[in-house]
Each structure stands twice: as C-alpha cells, then as structure tokens.
C-alpha cells in the first residue's frame, strides 16, 4: 500500500536563486524574412523620478524573442508619442514600421499603477487597441507580458503566451557529483525559483492544467517515484512509489488524473492512469513491450504513448474506454518517441531519429506525414506553448544540454543559453491567471 | 525546410535574482542520500585533494562483493542480452550472494544518452532485469536484489562519442547500499 508522505519543501517560492543558474540569453538562429516591423515607444511616466518599471522594454523583448516581430531599436525612434492622437503615420511610414505601440504609466491614488496603451496601424492610421489597466506594484512585469500578449494576438490572430512560465531541470557538476534542481521561471527566463533540489536525478516535470502544481519524477528516496508539488506552498506529496519504475507523469486535461509509466514487480513498463483523489489505478497497456511516455489527447479520451511492440519505439494511440486497442500513428523511420499533443489536438511533437540525429518532428494527426522541425544531433523533450505556436525542447550543444524553441511550423529557430550548468526537460506551463 | 536569412540577434534576459547570493540550499525533503556530496568550499591557500570516486569495475572487495571480481556489465547498443564474456562474472556474484544470504545488492541499469529519457529508463530496466534473472537463476535470492533503472540520468563518463557511450551502457552491482 502506498504511504503518502507530505514533505514540506523548505526552499519555497519565496527564495530567489543565487548565482548558480545565471543569465539565460535567447539567440534567434533562424528568423522569418517577413517578421513584422513595429515600433514600441517607451511609455510616458506621470510621476517624479524614474518609472517603477520599463513596460516598453519588456514588450519589445517579448515580441523580438518570438521571432515574429522586428521592433525598432529604441535609439531609432525619432519621435516618442504617448497617445494614438500623437502618432503621425507619415513619419512612421518613413521608418518602415507597420505598427506603433504608445502609452502612459501613471500612479493611482490607491497605490497601484495604471498602464494605458494604444496600438496604431501605420498603413491605415487606425487605432487597433486601446486599453487602460490597473496593476499592483508587484505585477508590473506580468502586466507588461500581457501587453505583449495583446499586441501579438491583435496582429497575428494567435493568443500570446508571454505571461506564462516554464519548468525545467538544471544539472551542475561532474558526472560523479551531480546536483539536480527543478526550477520554475517566467517564460523569458526571469524570476527563477528552485522548486526542488537533490543530489539524485529529477526528471519529467509536468504542469497541472491549473498551473498550480508540478508532477515530476525524483530518485531522492533511492528509487524512482512520482511526486506532486504545490508551487505556492512547496508541499510535496508522493503519489506513486510502487516497486520498480514510476515515471512519465502526465496530467489529464481536467487535472484529476495522472497517466504514468509503471513497471511494478515484473520489470516490464506499461501505461497506467492514476486518479489523484482516491489513488485508484487503472492499467491501460498490458504487453511485454515497453509502453511509456503517455500524453493525453486534447479531449482527454485517449492517450498517445511510446511503444516498442513493433521492434523499435513508435507512437501509438489508445482510447481509455474498456477494450480499446492501441493503434500506431507514426510510420516514418525506425525511432519515434515521447509524444506531446498540441493544445488544439491537431499535431503531435515527437522525438524522431532522422538521418542519424535525434530531432523534434511534428506529426499532423489528420493528414499523417512527419515534418522534422529541429536540426540538432541530440534534441529531445518537446513541450508545446499553450498557444501551440512554439515548441520548447532540449538541444545538446557543445556537449551540454541547453533549451531551444522552434515554431511549430519549423520556420523560426531560437536557442537559449545558460551561462553555467545544463538545462533540460523543459515543460511550458498552461495559460495562467 | 526553406532556408531563410538568419537574424543573429542576441538578447540578454537578465535574471531578477538576488545578485551575490549563493544558492546552496537544498530542501529538507531532498537527498538524505546527500552522503558523498562533500565540501564545496575550498580551503584557502592550499591545493585541494578531490574526493575519490570508485571506478566501475573496481574490485568488489572494497564494496563487499566477491574478491577480485568486477561489478559492472556492459551492453551493446539497444541490447539487453548479456554478452558471453560476462558469464563468469555473473556466476561469481551469484555464488557469493547464494552463500551470504544476508547480503543485499542494488542492480542498477543504465543506457547511453541517445534517445528519449523515459524510454531509456525502460531500456535500462530491461538490462537490470536481465542481470537480475541471471543472478537468481544461479542461486542469488530474490529478496537480496533490488533493481533500479537510471536510464541515461547517471552516466559513468561524460561525452557524446562512442567511447563514452559504450562505458555508459551498463549494469552495476552495488553492494552495501
């Protein structure tokens, strides 16, 4: 019988990271020739002294990092309007930008701030967005990301994912003295918080659909076990510590269940579904092959998973109703594994062996056909952004694991470098409130 | 894929970390297997002698197994069958365990770094199970053996070439833990 131990993890969200995992820089390796030229004008600040936060700088960094926009550098701005009425489109046409974002930051009487912003189309002079939003002093960065979201969505027609977070495993040290940390940060790499640390391996972080918890695998008890940790409180609950392998946790879309890979006593790994409220365990696969790495379909009614029942690993789908039979979904090449489902349920991201290198590929579930998206030799662990536009993954470069992002159509390629340590197994959060 | 002109733009994203603070905290719930972590601070002015680690394949005597017998079995790529050259190693350990009924060992399976992590956990488990079966067939008691799979998470050797890979595809017999 499983004993559920609730362990209070003392290094909680409040403690920021020190120097250990230092700067993350994002480099665009392959951009779009048709990225949108835009001017982000620093907001006017109505108070005395310097503004409490540079909203425009965050918006500019967000849009540039997405690879879909080409913001003017601040020093190229010949004028600094602060309202749509002050924007002279003829002048901006000369700078060859398609859009101008202007605004104003003010202090409110109740101690909050107000961010007021307007987005103007240079071609038509039309005001496309006009919003004023009150913000707590501590939420100015998050509010800036939401401005980026609004601009991204208005221009591209796709919801922005700038106000989201990522979880990843950071590894330091030589092979015989490793330290592992599970870290959560903003999607741009800022505000890192250690969720859990151990001298033993940590793997497979998975976000709950409400963004409040992480499930993950840890070996700190001496064996692999699956834990769920509530991010705000740090409370860590052991949810699966059966004999043998406990791995690959994945939350159902309604957050009430975890799909898991368990080997139990016989050493043969199969897929199970655990109901978190009552520890009810349902076996999904039952065969001598390896069945692991489950991922839920968008409607929560089936699981995609890796199985080597055909010889080498391929991706299969199985319904969750009794008597369902698994059907194979990948047919290109001899190695396809680690499926993840796009938020709209139409595409899978997988790890594929492509001409001698392990790469991220996208599978269109309706039409079939695998499209290789990344170009490394040892790429792994794909995770979709909640808007489905990008895929975060691990790329091994120069002998070290780093994170990278590819757009889900493969056109935009970015690399994230940490100045020290290795970063791997990143999971992109859902949309957060 | 289309070849597009590359935009090489480096954007620095600074951490909002408390600068200057050292991250040494490890929460209470973590590694009581912190044994082996050792000192991280350097003694001022003196050269440091690093902490020695036992090499795989070192004589089992130090760890508690049969004297003079290696404790690591290596595997071919994507295979979990035990190569014939390890037959006598297995026999020695099995006999040792059969005659020392109170001795318990961990049978730890590993893969090289290629491919997907959780799939590699399962592959390494296959290797560990193969060794476990071979040991029990030759007299080791079922309760003396705990199998653990680390997949690619605990390489013996860093590196992304075949010489590193072949040293990482292994099962280690670990006494005394």
Image (spheres, coloured by chain):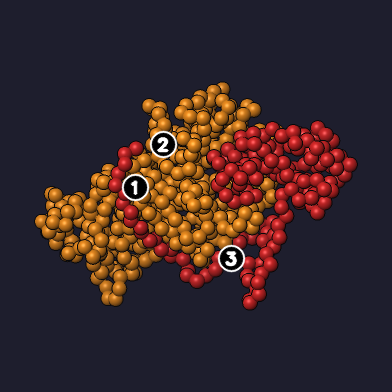
Chain colours: A orange, B red
Q: On the image, which quarter does residue A40 sit in? A: bottom left
Alpha carbon distance from label 1 to label 3: 37 Å
Asked if residue A218 lies left or right of residue A91, the reply is right
Crowding near pointer 1: few (<14 within 10 Å), some, many (20+)?
Answer: many
The percent coordinates of residue B47 (x first, y second) are: 65, 72
Q: Residues within 10 Å of mark 2 (few under 14, many from 20)?
A: many
Residue A350 located left or right of residue B28:
left
Residue B91 lies, with reference to residue A418, above or below; the image says above
Residue at mark 2: chain: A
x%, y% of residue A415?
Answer: 41, 51
* Residue at the image point whose x is 57% and y is 58% from the top: A172
> What percent of the width, then of the height, locates residue B126?
67, 35
Which mark is on residue A386? none
Q: Which type of secondary structure does the marked residue at label 3 adopt?
A: loop
- Mark 3 — residue? B24
Compared with B117, B22 (above or below) is below
Protein chain holding label 1: A
Quadrant showing the N terminus of chain A: top right
**Residue annotated with mark 2:** A372
| Residue A430 visible within the image | no
**Residues marked 2 and 3 touching at CB (< 8 Å):** no
Which residue is denoted by mark 1 in the rendering? Answer: A30
Tell me the subunit letter for badge 3.
B
Q: What SS does tag 2 mark?
A: strand
| Pointers 2 and 3 within a single chain | no
Look at the image and tell me whether residue A22 can be seen.
yes
């Amino acid at each position: 019988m499983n004993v559920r131990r609730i362990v209070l993890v003392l290094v909680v969200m409040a403690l920021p990271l020190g120097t250990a995992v230092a700067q993350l820089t994002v480099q665009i390796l392959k951009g779009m020739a048709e990225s949108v030229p835009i001017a982000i004008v620093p907001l006017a600040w109505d108070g005395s002294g310097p503004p409490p936060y540079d909203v425009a700088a965050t918006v500019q960094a967000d849009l540039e990092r997405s690879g879909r926009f080409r913001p003017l550098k601040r020093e190229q701005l010949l004028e600094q309007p602060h309202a749509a009425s002050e924007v002279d489109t003829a002048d901006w046409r000369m700078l060859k930008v398609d859009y101008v974002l202007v605004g104003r930051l003010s202090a409110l009487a109740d101690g909050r701030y107000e961010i007021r912003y307007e987005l103007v189309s240079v071609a038509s002079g039309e005001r496309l967005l006009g919003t004023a939003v009150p913000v707590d002093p501590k939420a100015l960065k998050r509010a800036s990301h939401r401005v980026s979201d609004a601009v991204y969505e208005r221009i591209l027609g796709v919801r922005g994912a700038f106000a989201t977070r990522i979880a990843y495993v950071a590894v330091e040290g030589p092979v015989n003295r490793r330290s592992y940390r599970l870290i959560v940060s903003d999607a741009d790499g800022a505000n890192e918080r250690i969720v859990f640390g151990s001298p033993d391996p940590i793997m497979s972080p998975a976000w709950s659909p409400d963004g409040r918890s992480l499930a993950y695998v840890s070996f700190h008890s001496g064996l692999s076990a699956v834990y769920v940790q509530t991010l705000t409180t740090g409370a860590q609950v052991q949810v699966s510590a059966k004999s043998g392998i406990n791995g690959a946790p994945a939350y159902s879309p309604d957050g009430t269940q975890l799909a898991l890979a368990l080997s139990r006593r016989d050493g043969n790994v199969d897929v199970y579904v655990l109901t978190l409220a009552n520890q009810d365990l349902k076996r999904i696969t039952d065969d001598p092959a390896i069945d692991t790495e489950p991922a839920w379909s968008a409607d929560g009614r089936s699981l995609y998973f890796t199985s080597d029942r055909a010889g080498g690993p391929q991706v299969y789908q199985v319904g969750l109703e009794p008597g369902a039979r698994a059907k194979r979904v990948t047919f290109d090449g001899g190695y396809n594994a680690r499926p993840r489902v796009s938020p709209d349920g139409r595409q899978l991201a997988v790890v594929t062996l492509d001409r001698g290198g392990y790469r991220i590929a996208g599978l269109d579930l309706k039409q079939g056909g695998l499209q290789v998206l990344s170009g490394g030799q040892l790429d792994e662990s794909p995770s979709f952004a909640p808007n489905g536009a990008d895929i975060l993954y691990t790329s091994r470069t120069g002998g070290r694991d780093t994170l990278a992002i590819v757009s889900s159509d493969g056109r935009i390629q970015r690399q994230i470098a940490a100045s020290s340590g290795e970063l791997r197994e990143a999971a992109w959060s859902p949309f957060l409130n | 894929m289309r070849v597009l002109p590359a935009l090489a733009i480096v954007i620095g994203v600074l951490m909002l970390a408390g600068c200057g603070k050292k991250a040494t905290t490890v929460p209470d719930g973590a590694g009581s297997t912190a044994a082996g972590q050792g000192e991280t601070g350097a003694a001022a002015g003196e050269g440091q002698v690093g902490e020695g680690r036992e090499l795989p394949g070192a004589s089992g005597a130090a760890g508690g197994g049969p004297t003079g017998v290696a404790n690591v079995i290596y595997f071919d790529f994507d295979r979990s069958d035990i190569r014939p050259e390890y037959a006598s190693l297995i026999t020695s350990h099995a006999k040792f365990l059969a005659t020392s009924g109170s001795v318990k060992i961990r049978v730890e399976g590993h893969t090289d770094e290629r491919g997907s992590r959780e799939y590699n956990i399962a592959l390494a488990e296959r290797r560990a199970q193969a060794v476990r079966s071979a040991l029990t067939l030759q007299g080791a008691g079922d309760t003396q053996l705990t199998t653990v799979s680390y997949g690619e998470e605990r390489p013996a050797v860093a590196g992304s070439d075949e010489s590193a890979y072949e040293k990482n595809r292994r099962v280690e017999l670990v006494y005394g833990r």
